[in-house]
Structures are given as C-alpha cells and as structure tokens.
Image: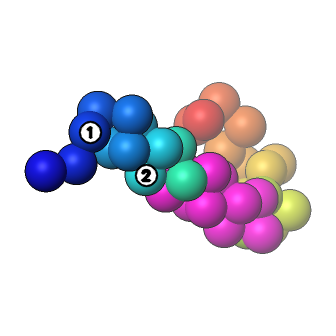
C-alpha cells in the first residue's frame, strides 16, 4: 500500500515533468496559444 503522501509526491513529480516538457514547446506556440494554459 502506498501512502497518500507518496501518491501526492508522485503526482507532483509527474506534473512538474509535464510542465517542463511543455516549456520546451512554448516558444513555438506561445504567440498563438497564450490563453490556453
């Protein structure tokens, strides 16, 4: 069994990684999709 804290940490790390990946594409789409975030 995983504790709630472990699950939250996993979610935070996944969200952080996804945000970092999105930032790589921001320069290409920032002008068109400023309000999409």
> Which residue is rendered at x = 26% and y = 39% of the image?
3
Residue 7 image position (x, y, % from top left): 33, 44
**Residue closest to the far left:** 1
Find residue 29 and report its image quarter. bottom right
Packing grade of label 2 (10 A; few <14, some 14-19, many >=20) is: few
Q: Is residue 11 above or below residue 34?
A: below
> Which residue is rendered at x = 65% and y = 30% of the image?
35
> Which residue is rendered at x = 78% and y = 69% of the image?
24
Residue 1 image position (x, y, % from top left): 13, 50
What segment is highlighted magenta in the picture?
14-24
Q: Secondary structure at mark 2?
A: helix
- Horizontally, residue 4 falls left or right of residue 14, namely left
Q: In the rendered structure, does residue 16 fall within the stretch colored magenta?
A: yes
Find residue 34 and report its image quarter. top right
Residue 18 image position (x, y, % from top left): 56, 59
Q: Nearer the viewer, residue 27 or 3?
A: 3
Q: Nearer the viewer, residue 5 or 27?
A: 5
Q: How many marks?
A: 2
Q: Is residue 14 above or below residue 6?
A: below
The Cα–Cα distance between marks 2 and 1, rounded to whole angstroms, is: 11 Å
Residue 10 got which mark? 2
- Horizontally, residue 4 falls left or right of residue 32, namely left
**Residue closest to the far right:** 27
Residue 33 got which mark? none
Identify the coloring.
rainbow
Q: Is residue 16 visible?
A: yes
Magenta: main secondary structure:
helix
User: Given this view, does label 2 or label 1 mark the residue nearer the observer?
Assistant: 1
- Horizontally, residue 35 falls left or right of residue 28, namely left
Name the residue beneath numbered marker 1.
Answer: 3
Q: Secondary structure at mark 1?
A: loop
Q: In the rendered structure, does residue 31 fall within the stretch colored magenta?
A: no
């Amino acid at each position: 069994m995983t504790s709630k804290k472990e699950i939250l940490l996993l979610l935070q790390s996944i969200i952080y990684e996804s945000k970092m990946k999105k930032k790589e594409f921001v320069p290409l789409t920032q002008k068109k999709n400023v309000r999409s975030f």
